[in-house]
Amino acid sequence: MRVLTYSNYDEMSAAAARMIATRIAELSEPVLGLATGSTPIGMYSELARLHNEEGLDFSGTTTFNLDEYWGLDPDDPRSYHWFMKEHLFSRVNLDPAKTHVPRGIGVDPDAECERYEKLIEEVGGIDLQVLGIGMNGHIGFNEPGSDPNSRTRLVRLAQQTVDVNMAKGALDSLPGHALSMGIGTIMEAKEILLLANGQGKAEIIRRALLGSVTRDVPASLLQTHSNVVCMLDEPAAKLLDLS
Ligand code: PGA
């Protein structure tokens, strides 16, 4: 794993956006795995800027989001469909037919997960998967204890995850379940970009990067992937001895 530390969030976000822009330029039909949450917001803003000011062209790019709350309509502002429209899809020239987020309502969950896995397979897999990390080490909505071979499925969220996400969004309620790509699905990405910022993430980043590889800290399983870049701001890197 390559660990890169930046002096602040904006620099980390700009570097992450540059890495994505490079892959988009290099690959004829790029397939990106995308994440939601507060961490990638700066990266999405920078991607929008690169599109508007430097002509970064998303028209040939396909995207797959990691997860969606179970039971939320895409038009619900709490949904990850909404988040992606707000932060990226409405700001760049992605083809709506090529942007994929699991459907969290009005479908049979097992059939939806199977459909999602097939779609990823049909386009030849994910070239670059962006990940944030939860306070408990989750990646996507793969909570501690998740099977390292898990595929896209309906998952029950840890209470901590629901509480943290409600607090971040100043929300009164969020579903307790979600559809999430599995750890096995994520690990098949050809390249992974793990992002974390802020002092609150320092301890979980230490455990994920330097601790033992265990399903109790899902992000630690990334240590077994051969092509991971981890971008951190200084506060998140604080407990790593990188000397
Ligand atoms: P955050 O969430 O980016 O809002 O910190 C990350 C996550 O829960 O995966």
Image (cartoon, grey):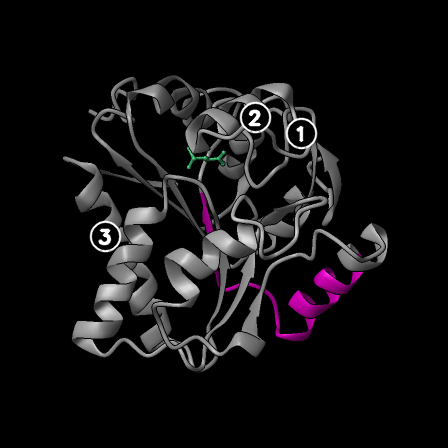
The Cα atoms of the two marked residues, 3 and 2, are separated by 27 Å
What secondary structure is found at the residue carrying circle 2? Answer: helix
Res. 120 in view:
yes
Picture coordinates of residue 122 (x, y %)? 68, 74
Ligand 1 image position (quadrant): top left
How many numbered discs? Answer: 3
Q: Which residue is mark 1?
A: 157
Amino acid type at circle 1 is Leu
Amino acid type at circle 2 is Thr
Write the start and end of the magenta stretch as one range. 114-131
Residue 29, above or below 176: below
124 left or right of 240 in image: right
Crowd band around label 2 with a 10 angstrom C-alpha radius: few (<14), some (14–19), many (20+): some
Q: Which residue is mark 2?
A: 161
Residue 19, above or below 158: below
Amino acid type at circle 3 is Ala
Picture coordinates of residue 53 (x, y %)? 16, 73
Q: Residue at x 53, y 75 (%)?
A: 96
Q: State whether label 2 is within 8 Å of ligand 1.
A: yes
Mark 1, mark 3: which one is toward the viewer? 1
Q: Are marks 1 and 2 in contact (CB under 8 Å)?
A: yes
Assign the C terminus to one quadrant of the image.
top left
What secondary structure is found at the residue carrying circle 1? Answer: loop
Residue 129 part of the magenta segment:
yes
Q: Which residue is mark 3?
A: 15
